[in-house]
Image (spheres, helix red, strand yellow):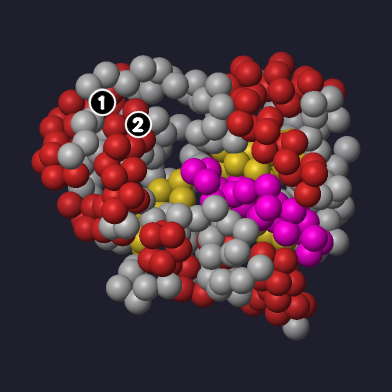
Amino acid sequence: MFTLSDPVVPIIAAPMAGGASTPELVAAVNQAGGLGFLAAGYRTAGVMAEQIARTRVLTDRPFGVNLFVPAATDPAALAGLPAYRAELLPEAERWGVELPERIPPDDEDWAAKLAVLLADPVPVVSYTFGLPTRQEATALRAAGTAQVATVTSADEARAAARLGMDALCVQGPEAGGHRGTHRAGDEPGTESLPELLVLVRAAVGLPLIAAGGLATGADLAAALRAGAAAVQLGTAYLRADEAGTSPVHRAALADPRFEQTVQTRAFTGRVARGLRNAFTDRHAGHAPHAYPEVHHLTAPLRAAAARRGDPEALHLWAGTGHARAGAGPAAEITAALWRAAQR
């Protein structure tokens, strides 16, 4: 079974749902000795299987697949959806799009994805937004798959350890994109990544992957000295040649107008960090913690903004180190960061 000591370089390309993570990005990071991850979130089981097959053509090294763990939405949060929809209607009218009035349940095609991963196992599966059932975790373990849980607190780490996870991805508040709390309504802790690593190390004895705001060789070295077995980078790869980052998002990351990042529920209902823009300002504190319903509610607005190249109305996920994210081949980005970390 895969272990975190297997990669030559202890750098993991974070799974970035929505298109940024691609088989080509996985293969490029693998080429540099790291570990690439596919992001199955928001994809069907069929598309996930296609990406796994494509990745196997591009690399013969181990890689991972990340799953979003579905959960029932809090009824109190659902009750806040109509008011938020009404707040968004003027923007929909301006963009010429319709917002859904009814949003059906979305289980992330969970059962079908597990069936694919059991029939054709990959070396590593990681979980975001929660944990699998004990039966599901046992089945994947029997298939020879190593399992990693994303955690944002010591309590979540203890729950993952009890389930028999092989390692934990400790995600600090500096991370771009969604904070992986196990319940959508939870307000994430404010402990910095170094502080959180200390808390989790004291709570469990599992290997830890440090994630959140790591952008320089010094950042990587500090996380490894703090006891992490590996580091996970997402924002650092958003401008990589092989990333599927949209052109408007890619440009915004290098645009001095977007200096700040904020944590917001405005786009999806879950807390996520992205570049501060007009949308995050207009709707700060207004979205209910209804995930994935808010994600589906705002999807037409985000799609229209992407088509028109408007960064002020788009979710521009980015960590606190986004200003240091460079462009170029992912293998070179990986190698340069590792050289700097070793220095």
User: Is residue 23 among what the camera can see?
Assistant: yes
What secondary structure is found at the residue carrying circle 1?
A: loop
Which residue is the site of mark 1?
Answer: 100
Q: Earlier in the sequence, mark 1 or mark 2?
A: 1
Marks 1 and 2 sit apart, C-alpha to C-alpha, by: 8 Å
Where 36 falls versus 225 (above or below)? above
Image coords of residue 268 (percent x, y) = 35, 39
User: Residue at (43%, 72%) from the top-left corner?
Assistant: 254
Which quarter shows the C terminus?
A: bottom right
User: Residue at (85%, 61%) from the top-left corner?
Assistant: 8
Amino acid beneath label 2: His
Q: Quadrant of residue 45?
A: top right
Q: Which mark is residue 4?
A: none
**Direction from residue 160 to residue 4 in the image, left or right:** right
Amino acid beneath label 1: Pro
**Direction from residue 120 to residue 45 in the image, left or right:** left
Image coords of residue 216 (percent x, y) = 61, 74
User: Residue at (73%, 41%) from the top-left corner?
Assistant: 54
Q: How many tags in the picture?
A: 2
Which residue is the site of mark 2?
Answer: 296
User: Is residue 79 among what the camera can see?
Assistant: no
Q: Is residue 111 one of those drawn in magenta?
A: no
User: Residue at (49%, 39%) from the top-left corner?
Assistant: 181
The front one of 129 and 112 is 112
The front one of 321 and 38 is 38
Q: Pointer 1 and pointer 2: residues touching (CB < 8 Å)?
A: yes
Give, as a single range, the part of the protein colored magenta: 12-35
Q: Quadrant of residue 100?
A: top left
Image coords of residue 165 (percent x, y) = 73, 35
